[in-house]
Image (spheres, helix red, strand yellow):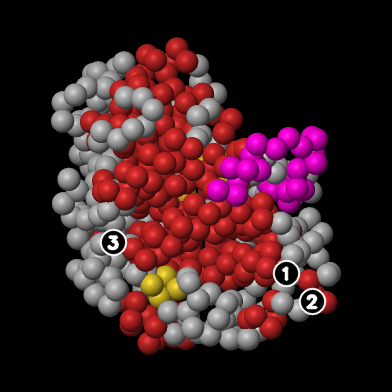
Amino acid sequence: MKMTNIIKTGILATATSLALVACTKNFEEYNTNPDAAQDIDSKSYITTMVMDAVIPCSDVGANEFQRACNLMGDAFAGYMSPSQLFNAGSYTCTYALNATDYNNVPFSVAFTKVMPAWLNLKYAYENGQIEEDVFAVAEVLKVMCLQRTTDIYGPIPVSGFGTDNNPYEAQDVVYKNLFEDLDNAIDVLAEYAALTYEEGGEPLAKVDAVYSGDYGKWYRLANSQKLRMAMRIRHVEPVLAQQYAEEAVAAGVMESSTDGATLKTTGSIAVQNPLDVVWNMYDDTRMGATMDAYLNGYEDPRLPKYFSQATVTGGGYHGVRSGLVDMETDGDPTVDMSCPNVTASTEVVWMRASEVAFLRAEGAFLGWSMGDNAKSLYEKGISLSFEENGLSTGEAQTYAQDAEKTPVQFVDVLGNRGGNAAAPSDITIAWAEDGRELERIITQKWIAMFPNGQEAWSEFRRTGYPKVIPIPDSNNMSDGEVDTDIQIRRMTFPRSEYANNGNAVAAAAALLSSGRDTGGTRLWWDVEDKD
């Protein structure tokens, strides 16, 4: 990856952000300056990483979040949909992937923000400025960031980061290296998780806006991340996937709702949920049609927790179908549809215990050793999700036993602009051994993971579930590169990389399954024949 030789480094007093222009040329000499290293606390780079590693939150105005998440994973997963028109209808949600610079943003966040901060921590660790426990947390954050990034693009340039030789690597190579790094971090955290600190005396207490330095929770998150990645590769590396999954569960994954990883205001670290800016200040996103169909069909008690009622006559919860082009740039009535129930202070979800229970349920369904059977873990996932959303155990039990309700058709209550769609599925809730167990697990997992659209989109691509309402075929602007029914499989490589690093991108495209850099090309773990 060709980068500039200019680095701009700035750490605010609250350590909430670090702006870095990515660089490999001359990177080491800039980042090993012993005088510069004395000016800051190296552990502050942990704050820099947590602000952007999973969900971009450091960008003022939430522009990065909108382009990297909301107009990608959130929409592709069926969670949310734009309520206004972008670029005359030629953008990510109509599969015109190269019509804007949106495809640059996830790559830029990873390689000009998160990875430079990680590199500074790596140098600090090698120079004895931080201990192994701090670097282990940095490794977990790196793994979570790069797993997200590779699941967007496929091949990415990783192993040589910070050097003059940093070629793109195939996704299978990236994943296997990430597993190795994660295992090393888990080994370190296992030791520190057993230690007891005075309250507020944890080494990372002041710089960690996720767990306030609780190594026991970081250890469980690391194992849960390993389980998530193991399940992601199970169709292409089934033996390795089972091994990693069983190791993660045996070591200890998230079990209770209090184990969940969320980014939140902590001490002097201020976190504003970027989704609040997008739906509230920008008026740019509303409930997706797929969410509408499932949550209304199930009469899901989480519906008012996730979304507000629409402001149209009669109220109710109503969504917007993604990919519409018969919309106005400003003031379109779709803004009257249901908004995400997110405020500026709502914690930013990374990973919840409910997701982990559903991961284990899938493993148990496959015959893996997950500590319980598939039915019990499936119902545990539902129960945990209800608890995570402030609902009762009784409500969860009633919901989990419902064998009648199914998703409903989506009706565009503002009039048919190509928005109406048939019910995406007829899957029921109650556990049944009817050959549809996997669809049932992933559908409920999808509901529980809201609003983490990137992971939901990845799970849809990996499993084919839940069945997501596609964009209207007539509005598909991919020039035949993306099949509307199969839906988008990956984001194209950044236009900035084509401009600045063309030879490397050409080599990266050759590593893709089709050898072509399109949104219809499947990633390594996204096999066409799922079982």
Q: Which element is circle 2 on?
A: helix
Q: Earlier in the sequence, mark 1 or mark 2?
A: 2
Residue in view at x 45 percent, y 68 percent: 102
Q: Amino acid at mark 2?
A: Pro
Q: Which residue is mark 3?
A: 524
Q: Amino acid at mark 1?
A: Asn
Query: Which label number is shown at residue 127?
Result: 1
Residue in view at x 33 percent, y 82 percent: 506
Q: Nearer the viewer, mark 1 or mark 3?
A: 1
Mark 1 packing: few (<14 Cα in 10 Å), some, or many (20+)? few
Magenta stretch contains residue 201: yes
Compared with 303, 242 (above or below) is below
Q: Nearer the viewer, mark 2 or mark 3?
A: 2
Compared with 1, 368 (above or below) is above
Asked whether 59 or 525 is in front, the reply is: 525
Q: Nearer the viewer, mark 1 or mark 2?
A: 1
Asked whether 379 or 159 is in front, the reply is: 159
Rounded to the nearest angstrom, the CA distance separating label 1 from label 2 is 9 Å
Give the extent of the magenta segment. 187-209
User: Mark 2 and mark 1 in contact (Cβ < 8 Å)?
Assistant: yes
Rounded to the nearest angstrom, the CA distance separating label 2 from label 3 is 42 Å
Residue in view at x 60 percent, y 46 percent: 189
Q: Which residue is mark 2?
A: 34
The C terminus - image quarter: top left
| Quarter assignment of residue 513 | bottom left
Whole-percent x, y for residue 147 in the image? 44, 57
Left or right for 34, reference 364: right
Mark 3 packing: few (<14 Cα in 10 Å), some, or many (20+)? some
Q: Main secondary structure of the magenta part?
A: loop
Rounded to the nearest angstrom, the CA distance separating label 1 from label 3 is 37 Å
Mark 2 packing: few (<14 Cα in 10 Å), some, or many (20+)? few
